[in-house]
Amino acid sequence: MTYIEVATFPTLSFAQVRARLAARQETALLDVREEDPFAQEHPLWAANLPLSRIELDAYRRIPRRDAVLVLYGSHDGEDLAPRAARKLIALGYSAVHLLEGGLEAWRAAGGELFRDVNVPSKSFGELVEHERHTPSLSAEEVSQLIADEADMVVVDARRFDEYRTMSIPTATSVPGAELVLRVRELAPDAATRVVVNCAGRTRSIIGTQSLVNAGLPNPVAALRNGTIGWLLAGQTLDHGADRRPPEPTAATRAAARADAQAVAARAGVRSLAYPGLSGFLDPEHTTYLLDVRTPEEYDAGHLPGFLSAPGGQLVQETDHHAPVRGARFVLFDTDGVRAPMTGSWLAQMGWEVHVLEDVPAAALSATGAAPPDRPPLPEVPLITAAALAEARDGAQDDPAALQIIDVSPGADYVRGHIPGAWYAIRAQLGAALETIPAARRYVVTCGAGILARFAVADLAEHLGPTAEVFVLDGGNAAWRAAGHPLAQGETRLAVPRTDRYRRPYEGTDAPRLAMQAYLDWEFGLVAQLARDGTHHFRVV
């Protein structure tokens, strides 16, 4: 690969990027740092695409190769954006720019900076509550209703795995996009109260307002501040719950469909007949083709070219699924409920949204997970698990003989890694080598050995052309499958674990001060939106 000098990269200034966002011109503002520093501060429409994972994620998240990309991000004084730009150009992207002056220039120009992840979605949720006065109940009120055995159902709008980790007592798992489709079956009596919860605020607000917008006759309210509010009120959560709603009847589906389509029409969602899909797609627009049903339904049969994006999570994590602001969505479901309801929220967030209709069942010909969309894997020297085990044994009396470097996500490393392996972030291999003792041979590994293959060239840049660098064939999965032991914990961290931001609301041991600080941050998002002025949100 021919490297391009930094000076040759075109730049866009704060004013130019802001003007593009204001005009809704397709723009991907990309923060190439790891997730934790990204979460500390970034512009509203910045999406996190870590330098470490560009080859794995870019094609899926930025499908049009000539979309305008604007990169920024530094670590320990190094500007990571030029390195990221070189990789994106090598992947075929033709309109790669650097943000002039980086994040500091954005700040100096008066640009608003936001904390946390999925900020567009969370700030939109706060705006919805602010403008629509979404009804809510406190943890104390809901707890008393449960104690009184009131005529009430509690529905958890998060992913099922989140619900399993911790849930409100008696709650049933109904992920956000499923609410309008399924709640009528859970609460057929219009007098039954429906309480929607999530971990914090966004998904409960959007879920509750979805039911209000769809005209559900029941009294509906969000659990104010979700499981965070529940814990802060001194209440106890359940763990390992597995309640799911019954399948909706034909009559329930029909009523939900009529309501959802009316909501979508008010929001400006457009219809697209399936026979016209191929003609709708063109090289001048980035179009995200997304199936908003459950992952199980997607795996059983889906349209080729469509990716799985369950609707509730799509609304919650729009920046992850669609980094290109100004792009278009085409959404698909099989019931005429979930895609229109999901689309209604995306349209209110300023996206152009189309719902695919008239799709014949035979067209759902693809099964299983979508195939990975990434460049060909580099040809690198491989070592088998058996050979690595033998080399480890032989290096017991000679530490300079071998070093193993694991570039897996930090959480995966902690759960299980080859004994003696060093944890390193791929984009920070230079810094990692300042801690890892020098060796005659290096073996790079990760979960399945994919990211490790891309990391070999980076490692070779620091070690020189004569270094022996191998990739564990099949990665840690092959090591485990061969019956070799794994170590756990943060045994050898060559760099800090900044690849993932710890959400204040996740897990069962979140500090109370962090949870309260998170809620306080969410309450301030509406004011930040007003100062930023680039959102194009329109609450109907």
Image (cartoon, rainbow, N blue to C red):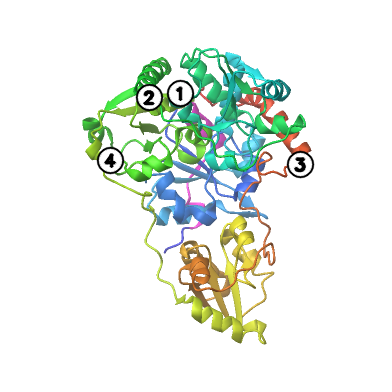
Left or right of 527: which side holds 247?
Answer: left
* Residue 364 disc label: 4
User: Is residue 540 shown to the viewer in this render?
Assistant: no
Alpha carbon separation for disc pair 3 and 2: 43 Å
Residue count near mark 1 (Cα–Cα under 10 Å), binned few <14, some 14–19, many ≥20: some
Q: Nearer the viewer, mark 3 or mark 1?
A: 1
Q: Which mark is residue 511?
A: 3
Amino acid type at circle 4 is: Leu
The part of the image, by quadrant, that contains residue 66 is top left
Q: CA distance from mark 1 to mark 2?
A: 8 Å
Q: Are marks 3 and 2 in contact (CB under 8 Å)?
A: no
Residue under label 1:
185
In depth, the one of 430 and 378 nearer the eye is: 378
- Secondary-structure class at tag 4: loop
Q: For mark 1, give the secondary structure.
A: helix
The residues tagged by marks 3 and 1 sit, at their Cα atoms, a distance apart of 37 Å
Q: Residue 523: image x %, image y %?
A: 68, 25
Between the residue at mark 2 and the residue at mark 4, the CA separation in whole angstroms equals 23 Å
Q: Which region is colored magenta?
A: 5-22
Q: Nearer the viewer, mark 1 or mark 4?
A: 1
Q: Is residue 43 above or below residue 79?
A: above
Does label 3 or label 4 sit earlier along the sequence?
4
